[in-house]
Image: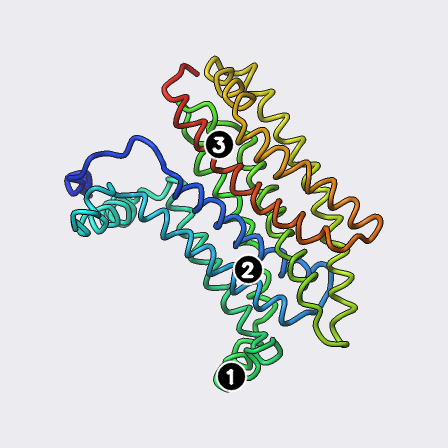
């Protein structure tokens, strides 16, 4: 078989670093996928039943994952070409990306696996959510969606389990995507996929804190949502504790394992955005607020903590990318 060199199609200037759009992509990918994962987890492992919450959270999760993909695509071509109307450059990127896989059998890049995981999560998540359309708020009032729901309910369990599997796969992929860059100490870290999974599930838990706080539901569902709300508050308290532990292990490994890792460590502790924005406001403050809210039922603290967790989830990815860009090519 003759291998095709798809680099011949890439006539634009090579990209030397990733911009903020990639941080948005990684954040929305982890958040959206984990929203579907948690919905299916509650249904099939915790045996809870909340059609509106499951359907709308999973549909929104699918939307966020794919919306985040737009930022990845936009980051794959030079903005100067876009500004001057050279839109064809993006199609060259897509041709090179998919052509290398289809014609050369090059399926090993994590970005290729990620595209597959995202496609499968989107498919099965949508099927599972639509199987609830005859019982979910708003959706149940749309006639053709009620018909579609009856078609898909025969395999509802299968769709749900596959949503759970590919949801956590997408969340993990966002960490593996960066961890295979051996020349960049901030990215080539064995704990990075674990850290991103914990953060993704934590941010999705924050979404469910917001849902159960604002969407009380009718009498038939209110008690279930109150229980779920109490559970996700304690769950996120535990997840933030794990994330703090993972952050400590991440920087401990960086400092002692790489020469360049010491530079990353120094950048982190001297970065006000990382120390105050992410570590303090994005982790420690919501951790304390969640404990107070769950222990003493101070309910108004719940949405504040949830919003701070979401804010911190984005900043984590932003600064991991930022530290990688500005330490390359330090020795590893």
Label 2: which residue? 162
Q: Judging from the image, what secondary structure is the residue with disc 2 in?
A: helix
CA distance separating discs 2 and 3? 30 Å
In the image, is residue 84 above or below residue 281? below
Q: Position of residue 90 (x, y in %)?
A: 23, 49
Q: Residue at x 48, y 84 (%)?
A: 144
Is 103 on the left-hand or right-hand side of 280?
Answer: left
> Is label 1 or label 2 in front?
1
Earlier residue among tags 2 and 3: 2
**Position of the N terminus by quadrant:** top left
Q: Which mark is residue 320?
A: 3
Out of 168 and 206, give the one closest to the viewer: 206
Identify the residue at the far bottom of this view.
143
Looking at the picture, how far across and down is residue 18, in whole percent?
36, 36
Marks 1/2 in contact by CB < 8 Å: the verdict is: no
Crowd band around label 3 with a 10 angstrom C-alpha radius: few (<14), some (14–19), many (20+)? some
- Where in the figure is residue 153, as x and y percent of width and height? 58, 76
Is label 1 in a helix, a strand or a loop? Answer: loop
- Residue plotted at (52% across, 59% down): 61
Along the polypeptide, which appears first: circle 1 or circle 2?
1
The numbered disc on residue 142 is 1
Q: Residues within 10 Å of mark 1 (few under 14, many from 20)?
A: few
């Amino acid at each position: 078989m003759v291998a095709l060199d798809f680099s011949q199609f890439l006539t634009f200037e090579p990209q030397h670093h990733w911009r903020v759009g990639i941080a948005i992509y990684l954040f929305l990918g982890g958040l959206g996928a984990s929203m579907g994962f948690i919905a299916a987890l509650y249904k099939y492992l915790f045996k809870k039943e909340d059609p509106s919450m499951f359907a709308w959270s999973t549909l929104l999760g699918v939307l966020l994952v794919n919306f985040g993909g737009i930022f990845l695509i936009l980051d794959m071509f030079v903005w100067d070409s876009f500004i001057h109307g050279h839109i064809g450059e993006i199609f060259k990127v897509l041709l090179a990306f998919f052509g290398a896989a289809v014609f050369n059998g090059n399926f090993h890049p994590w970005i290729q696996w990620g595209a597959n995981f995202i496609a499968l999560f989107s498919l099965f998540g949508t099927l599972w959510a639509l199987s609830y359309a005859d019982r979910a708020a708003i959706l149940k009032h749309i006639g053709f969606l009620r018909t579609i729901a009856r078609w898909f309910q025969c395999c509802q369990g299968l769709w749900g389990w596959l949503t759970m599997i590919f949801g956590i796969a997408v969340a993990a992929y966002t960490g593996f995507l960066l961890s295979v860059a051996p020349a960049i100490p901030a990215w080539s870290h064995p704990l990075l996929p674990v850290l991103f999974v914990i953060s993704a599930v934590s941010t999705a838990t924050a979404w469910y804190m917001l849902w159960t706080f604002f969407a009380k539901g009718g009498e038939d569902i209110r008690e279930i949502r109150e229980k779920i709300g109490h559970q996700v508050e304690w769950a996120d308290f535990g997840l933030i504790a794990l994330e703090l532990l993972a952050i400590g292990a991440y920087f401990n490994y960086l400092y002692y394992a790489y020469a360049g890792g010491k530079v990353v460590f120094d950048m982190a502790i001297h970065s006000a955005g990382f120390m105050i924005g992410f570590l303090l406001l994005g982790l420690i403050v919501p951790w304390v607020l969640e404990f107070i809210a769950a222990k003493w039922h101070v309910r108004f603290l719940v949405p504040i903590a949830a919003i701070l967790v979401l804010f911190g989830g984005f900043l984590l990815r932003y600064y991991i990318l930022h530290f990688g860009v500005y330490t390359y090519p330090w020795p590893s």
